[in-house]
Every structure is written in C-alpha cells, then in structure tokens.
Amino acid sequence: MEPKMVTRDAFTLMGVMERFAHGNEDFEGIWKRFMRYHDQIQPLSTDKVYYGVYFVIDEGKELDCLAGMAVADVDSIPDGLVVREVPAARYAVFECTVETISDTYDWIFGQWLKTAPYARPGENSPKADFERYPPATDSGDTPVLIHIVLEDEPEEEQGSQ
C-alpha cells in the first residue's frame, strides 16, 4: 500500500471543532455534531466532500479535530460553527475504506513512517493530517483518502540544500 505524493494549496473549512486529549478522541461524536449543521454548510461547500482534520496542539498532547466541508469566502459564521484554514502542504495520500480507516492508520504510523524517507512537521506546526470523504459516505466500503502531512522534501534531500 504505497501512497501517492501530492501537494495541496491551502483551503478553508467550515464545520464543528473539538479539542481532545490525544488518545481520547470522539470521532463519532464530532461527526454527529457536524450532521446537525450539515444543511447550513453543504450549500456553501466548494467541492461537496467531507473533511476530518487533525491539528496537533501542545506538543502532541491534544488535537483540535474539525469535521467539516471546504468553503470559499464566508460572510458570516453561524453559531456553533468554526472556519479554519488548512495550510498548503505536501502529503502522502493513502486510499482505504471507512471500514479500514483504523487499520490503515495503524499501518501508516506503525510501519510506513518508520521506513519512509519523509520527515513529519514539528509538533506545533500549523499543518494538519486529514481524511477526505466523498459525498454519500454511508457504507463501510466507501473510499476514503487519508492525507498524512510531510515536510516539503524527503529527509535525504533536505540535508543537501
């Protein structure tokens, strides 16, 4: 399961966000909260897909988890929602299904990153990992793209500059 390397421009999300202690995330709960606002956000979406984004806080002790959709300029933010930018970055993109997300993350962090020639951003980087879900993600075999943020260049190339 080798990833595809991509560079993405910055993009803006509108959704719900919660801060969790690392290891105590409530992914199901945050998506349930998002669904309460879905009908307000969906008409503003630029690509009609869903994002689960993970911003590392406090040297990895906490995560800001955002469930939302990409939007363009927003005139006002409805109560209960946030707007946050995901900075431009380079990513390793892994395809999996909703059903295999957990196993895919286990493989990425347990095996792939240990031997990959890529560095991860520092703990307090504004860059973020995220999942990209297509519209109508309601079955276990729906494809999901996991984006793992990387430094701009592979480790071996960084030393030669």
Image (spheres, rainbow, N blue to C red):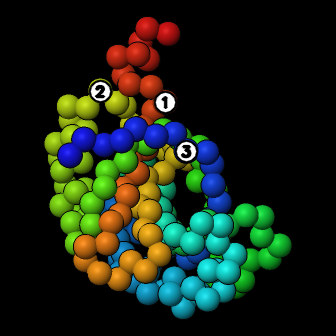
What residue is at 77 percent from the left and 70 percent from the top? Answer: 74
The nearer-to-camera label among 3 and 2 is: 3
What residue is at 18 percent from the left and 50 percent from the top? Answer: 107
Q: Position of residue 90 (x, y in %)?
A: 48, 38
Q: Of the numbered discs in the image, which one, if any, rests on residue 91?
A: none
Q: Position of residue 112 (x, y in %)?
A: 21, 40
- Cα separation, mark 2 vs mark 1, equals 12 Å
Is residue 19 shown to the viewer in this render?
Answer: no
The vertical placement of 2 against 24, above or below, is above
Q: Is residue 111 left or right of residue 30?
A: left
The vertical placement of 80 against 87, above or below, is below
Q: Which residue is mark 1?
A: 152
Label count reads 3
Which residue reaches farthest right? Answer: 75
Q: At label 2, which amino acid type do we have?
A: Pro
- Asked if labels 2 and 3 touch by Cβ distance under 8 angstroms, the answer is no
- Categorize mark 2 by other alpha carbons within 10 Å: few (<14), some (14-19), many (20+): few
Q: Is residue 116 left or right of residue 149?
A: left
What residue is at 21 percent from the left and 35 percent from the top? Answer: 114
Q: Which residue is mark 2?
A: 117
Camera-side residue: 141 or 55? 141
| Disc with the residue nearer the chain's start (1 vs 3) | 3
Camera-side residue: 14 or 93? 93
Q: Position of residue 125 (x, y in %)?
A: 51, 43
Name the quadrant containing residue 82.
bottom right
Q: At label 3, which amino acid type do we have?
A: Arg
Is residue 10 shown to the viewer in this render?
Answer: yes
Q: At label 1, which amino acid type do we have?
A: Asp
Q: Of the numbered discs in the image, which one, if any, rests on residue 8?
A: 3
User: SS class of the residue under badge 3?
Assistant: strand
What residue is at 25 percent from the left and 56 percent from the top? Answer: 105
- Cα separation, mark 1 vs mark 3, equals 11 Å
